[in-house]
Every structure is written in C-alpha cells, then in structure tokens.
Image (tube, rainbow, N blue to C red):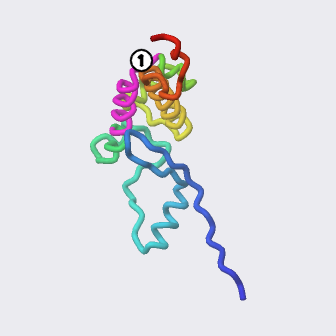
Amino acid sequence: MKSKHNPAIECQKIELDGTCYVILRESVYAELCRAAGITARSDIPECQQSLNTTIGSGIDLDQSSMAEKIKRRRQVSGLSQAELARRAGIRPETLNRIERGRTTPDFSTVRKLVIAMNKAEQDSLNLNLPPNKGDHSNENEQ
C-alpha cells in the first residue's frame, strides 16, 4: 500500500503590529486557490509593479497599512528612523521610503525591522523592571 505524503508549504510568517501575515510564492498561492476550488485574484499587481501603479485600485491598502504600522511601531518603540535603520542594518533613506509608502519592503527587510523593534522594546522593558525579588544584593542595606 502506498503511503500518501503531504508536502509542507514553503512560507514565511511575520507578525506586524499584532497582525500575522504569511508570505508564500505566487505559484503556491495559485495552487492553493485551485485546490480549494476558488479563483485566484487577478487584480493583484505583478511583483515588478511599483506602488504608484496601484494607487486607487484598492491594492495599495495593505502596502500603506504596512507602512503606517511600521511607523507606528517604531514610534511606540521610542526609536528614531535613524536609530531603527541602524539597529536593523538598513539605510535610513530606505526606512524613510518604506514609512512614506514609496517602496514596499521585501520579507528580509520587514524581518530585520521587526527584530530590531522587538529588541528595542525588550531593552526598554528590561530597563524599567524593578529589581528581581530573588535578588539579595541589597540585603545589607537597611
């Protein structure tokens, strides 16, 4: 008897401002739609199209939403554009264009930004935490 093997789908998962996104190859998306018996959206722009070509079509909503979320998250993290860019290892000009919705970052760039903001937020929390209750370093002070 032949065993069926369900192959795993190659994808990347990211969380941005509390919303989870899954990034997968377009061919995988098309195959999933076909298998589900639904029609893949034909109004999704080609990868090479710039953001400017999609303005007004409704497609730019997610791109501008991502830009707004990155900017809001950076501000909540207490980072300047220059500091976030430095921590993420990208050019400040690139971050500026991303936040203004002039360019859509690839997965790698989004990942760098999210990791840098998570680290900044964690560092901030660690600085604001009271001393550990198990810390007896100040026992002699009374």
Which amino acid is tagged 1?
Ser
Q: Position of residue 86 (x, y in %)?
A: 53, 19
Using the image, determine if residue 60 lies above or below residue 92. Answer: below
Question: What quarter of the picture does the C terminus occupy?
Answer: top left
Q: Nearer the viewer, residue 9 or 49?
A: 9
Q: Position of residue 112 (x, y in %)?
A: 54, 32
Q: Nearer the viewer, residue 60 or 67?
A: 67
Residue at image location 49% in from the left, 26% down from the top? 132
Residue at image location 49% in from the left, 43% down from the top? 48
Magenta stretch, main secondary structure class? helix
Q: Nearer the viewer, residue 97 or 118?
A: 118
Using the image, determine if residue 115 lies above or below residue 19. Answer: above
Q: Is residue 50 visible?
A: yes
Query: What residue does disc 1 label?
Result: 80
- Magenta segment includes 48: no
Q: Quadrant of residue 43?
A: bottom left
Residue at the extreme top of the image, as rendered: 141
Q: Position of residue 104 (x, y in %)?
A: 44, 36
Residue at image location 57% in from the left, 24% down from the top? 89
Q: Position of residue 74 (x, y in %)?
A: 40, 26
Graded by Cα atoms within 10 Å as few (under 14), some (14 to 19) or many (20 or more), the crowding at tag 1 reads: few
Question: What quarter of the picture does the N terminus occupy?
Answer: bottom right
Q: Is residue 4 left or right of residue 71?
A: right
Residue at the extreme bottom of the image, as rendered: 1
Using the image, determine if residue 74 lies above or below residue 64. Answer: above
Q: Is residue 94 visible?
A: no
Label 1 residue SS? loop
Q: Nearer the viewer, residue 38 or 110?
A: 110
Using the image, determine if residue 137 lies above or below residue 114. Answer: above
- Magenta segment includes 81: yes
Q: Which residues are magenta?
A: 65-82
